[in-house]
Image (spheres, rainbow, N blue to C red):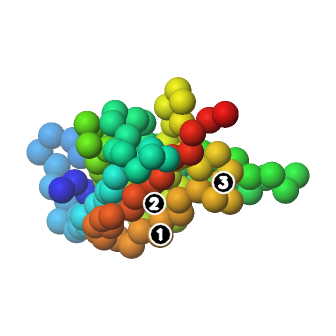
Amino acid sequence: MGFAPGIVRAFREFITIVPDQRNAEVSLFLIPAASISGRVFLSSGAPAPYVNVTLGVVQNLENGRRMFLPSLYTSADAMGRYRLAPLGAGEYVLRVENDNYLGSPDLGKATLVTVKPSEEIVGVDIHMTELP
């Protein structure tokens, strides 16, 4: 298990310590990272081996459009299993793509997952659609 990066950014402070300097009041808070795992399936129901799984967030633009901002990538194994970690708390979108199939081309239909601090979410399965 890792630790979630940048969860408490509002309280982040940089401390420079020089040789032989002692600081008595330094506290570090480490929050265990969260994770999302599951399987990817083809439209036939068979596992989707070695596909890329992308985790990101959706940003609403001023013109009313939405943009997917990727932040973490992984590849599924031979049985379509994937795991994304380390994650901080937040609301994430999962997308999957390969040459012949597409997972969630419409952001409104993409797999949306809400993650709490240090939560391990399992069984987030993604079903891909065959491209025309």
Nearer the N terminus, badge 2 or badge 3? Answer: 2
- Rendered position, 6 above or below 67: below
- The residue tagged 2 is 9
| Position in image of residue 49 (x %, y %) | 33, 36
Q: Is residue 125 left or right of residue 78?
A: right
Nearer the N terminus, badge 1 or badge 3? Answer: 3
Tell me which amino acid carries mark 2.
Arg
Q: Nearer the viewer, residue 25 or 75?
A: 75
Q: Quadrant of the C terminus?
A: top right
Q: Nearer the viewer, residue 99 or 26?
A: 99
Q: Quadrant of the N terminus?
A: bottom left
- The residue tagged 1 is 114
Labels 2 & 1 near each other (Cβ < 8 A): no
Q: Is residue 18 left or right of residue 84?
A: left
| Alpha carbon separation for disc pair 1 and 3 | 15 Å
Is label 1 or label 3 in front?
3
Secondary structure found at label 2:
helix
Residue at point 17% right, 65% down? 24
Is label 2 or label 1 in front?
1
Nearer the N terminus, badge 2 or badge 1? Answer: 2
Tell me which amino acid carries mark 1.
Thr
Q: Residue furthest front?
A: 44
| Alpha carbon separation for disc pair 2 and 1 | 19 Å
* Residue 47 picture quarter: top left
| Alpha carbon separation for disc pair 2 and 3 | 28 Å
Residue at point 34% right, 52% down? 39
Tell me which amino acid carries mark 3.
Leu
- The residue tagged 3 is 107
Q: Is disc 2 surrounded by few (<14), some (14 to 19) or many (20+) residues within 10 Å?
A: few
